[in-house]
Amino acid sequence: MSEANDSREDVVIAQGLTKQFHAGPIAVVAVNEVDLRLPRGKLVALRGSSGCGKSTFLNLLGALDRPTGGALTVDGVDVAGLRGKEEVGYRRHKTGFVFQSFNLIPHLTATENVMLPMEFTGLPRRQQEERARSI
């Protein structure tokens, strides 16, 4: 398979992806020059010890934070270059997060929690339910 075909099969491509935070004069590197390709349609687990950068990496994938170096492409979208409406559209249509328990609404069912972000898409309720159940 050629390189061009490989890139179409990869939904996530990180090249030299870096995220650095500053605590006063000290630089903390949370994600350090990650090179990664994640194939479309595969289930991938991200694991590691506490503080190793898993959540930071996911925040970069979801455009909740911006990298300080390198490149990140998700489904053909240059995530680091997103701004304004494009960024909102990316979050609305390309990504989804189910945060740890503190962000779930306890009086809603699991399906209703999954449907909640779909309220803003204009999708009819029946289609929201079908989509949520398929997820």
Image (cartoon, rainbow, N blue to C red):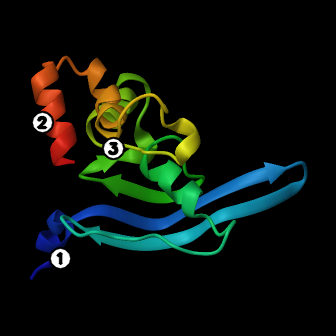
Neighbour tally class for label 3: few under 14, some 14-19, many 20 plus, Cα within 10 Å: few
Q: As rendered, which of 52 and 28 lies closer to the eye?
A: 52
Q: For residue 11, what is the image quadrant?
A: bottom left
Q: Which residue is mark 2?
A: 130
Q: Amino acid at mark 3?
A: Thr
Instruction: Pinpoint residue 87: horizontal percent, then vertical percent.
Output: 39, 32
Looking at the image, which is closer to me, 67 or 51?
51
Q: Name, please, the residue furthest toward the bottom.
A: 1
Q: Is residue 65 visible?
A: no
Q: Residue 107, percent across and down?
A: 45, 28
Q: Secondary structure at mark 1?
A: helix
- x then y, percent, for residue 30: 66, 62
Residue appearing at x 60%, y 52% in the figure: 68
**What's the distance in space between the residues labelled 1 and 3, CA to CA?**
25 Å
Look at mark 3 in the image and give the residue it sits on. Answer: 95
CA distance separating discs 3 and 2: 18 Å
Under mark 2, the amino acid is Glu
Tag 1 and tag 3, C-beta contact below 8 Å:
no
First of labels 1, 3 by sequence position: 1
Q: Earlier in the sequence, mark 2 or mark 1?
A: 1
SS class, disc 2: helix
Which circle, 2 or 1, is nearer the viewer? 2
Residue that label 1 marks: 3
Extreme residue in the right direction: 25
Q: Residue at x 9, y 82 (%)?
A: 1
Label 1 vs label 3, nearer the camera:
3
Compared with 56, 134 (above or below) is above
Q: What amino acid type should be assigned to the residue bearing mark 1? A: Glu
Q: Residue at x 41, y 64 (%)?
A: 14
As displayed, is residue 81 above or below residue 5?
above
